[in-house]
Amino acid sequence: MEWEAFLEQLASGQQLLQASFSNPRRKDNGTARKLTIRPIKLKDGLGFQCERIDLNKAYHENITPHELNDKLKFEMSQYKQALFKTEEADVQVLSNKKGALTLLMHTPTMKANDAMQEHNRSKAYVLPEGDPVPFLIELGVMSADGRVLKAKYDKFRQINRFLEMVSDVLADLPKDKELTVVDFGCGKSYLTFALYHLLAIKERIPVRIIGLDLKKDVIETCAQLAKQLKWDKLSFAVGDISDYKGHDEVDLVVTLHACDTATDAALLKAIHWNASVILSVPCCQHELFRQISQPALKPLLKHGLLKERFTALVTDAARANLLEIAGYRTQLLEFIDLEHTPKNMLIRAVRGSGSASNTEQVKQEYEAFKSWLNISPFMEQGIKL
């Protein structure tokens, strides 16, 4: 059987009971050493849970059935082997050095009743429900007994998703020193407090975190809560991203929902600091909307709504490629589900040691990309092209 034919069978109704991926093709691109995908029951019906095992920790992500095949295709490109279990057969997939796939059919070893499991939300969370967390109680997300308030459950999921993404890159942060973290545009600072809890309280990593925002009243409230929690290594200041000069070196930069080119300014600051890790969720993006021009795309660009969405994707693609040119391994990840917010894409960049030839290739691809779309992103001014 061919790989595409097998995927078509899964799409046409043959139930996937389990998929296990192992032996990553590369060890330096953030791929987990093992990935397992299995069906689960969600409140909205059937779903699939992806469990990544790395550094003896498990990280979870849920996907819908219509996302499954794209997910399987992508993950198969990242691993040298996989085992797919259905009621009809166990299918072993082997990938050679050139990426060609060989499928081997075996007698089935699993039944549908054995595979299906109830979705236990608490197992997937870095901060499990039912375990009282002081800062979540003070911020009105949890009750004193650890129960998540119904009106704040989306915020609770967002916090945990963010902490999963941070946990994935803990190994990429410097060791044997106090980490310096700057959160640009921290706002009410749910995630800033969560980050401090993860690093300083849960992982016991020496860290100093600075939250920066333009709203004085919000900063004063956050500073008071940090004092109340006796978190003396968490501080807040009123300030603008582009003018901030508080540190010469920063290890982790977080920028969530900084509007338009403020995101680019934060990314350039992070690059200037040679930050080990950057986590960025872009907000509204207008700069390239006024620039983008390509006659072949007129059927798309003539519609304002489609142009806006397309431009947002182009903007983040440009940012990701410029980060790669600057020496970062970059991933675009789903932050939280689309049903909760349209601003759901997170750029995660880890400083790496890519080869000069690969960097040159990324430069050439980027130059062709920007030339075809007639764009000149703000972020280019701080990147050597």
Image (tube, helix red, strand yellow):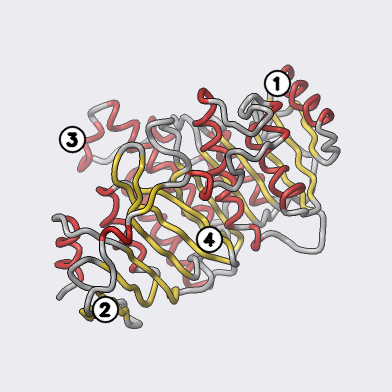
Q: Mark 3 points at which residue?
A: 299
Q: Where is residue 183 in the image (x, y as percent from the top left)?
A: 68, 38
On the image, which quarter does residue 366 sit in? Answer: bottom left
The answer to which of marks 1 and 2 sits earlier in the sequence is: 2
- Which of these two is toward me, 271 or 236? 236
SS at circle 4: strand
The answer to which of marks 3 and 1 sits earlier in the sequence is: 1
Specify whether 176 is left or right of 311: right
Judge depth for marks 3 and 4 and give the one in front.
4
Q: What residue type is labelled 3?
A: Pro
On the image, which quarter does residue 228 sit in? Answer: top right
Q: Mark 4 points at which residue?
A: 329
Circle 1 residues within 10 Å: few <14, some 14–19, many ≥20:
some
In the rendered structure, are the residues bearing label 1 and label 4 in contact, judged by CB atoms less than 8 Å apart? no
Q: Mark 2 points at which residue?
A: 100
Circle 2 residues within 10 Å: few <14, some 14–19, many ≥20:
few
Specify whether 181 is left or right of 19: right
Q: Cα distance, mark 3 to mark 4?
A: 34 Å
- Which of these two is toward me, 93 or 37? 37
The answer to which of marks 3 and 4 sits earlier in the sequence is: 3
Q: Mark 1 points at which residue?
A: 218
On the image, which quarter does residue 171 sit in? Answer: bottom right
- Which of these two is toward me, 202 or 291? 202
Q: Which amino acid does label 4 sit on?
A: Arg
Q: Which amino acid does label 2 sit on?
A: Ala
In the rendered structure, are the residues bearing label 2 and label 3 in contact, judged by CB atoms less than 8 Å apart? no
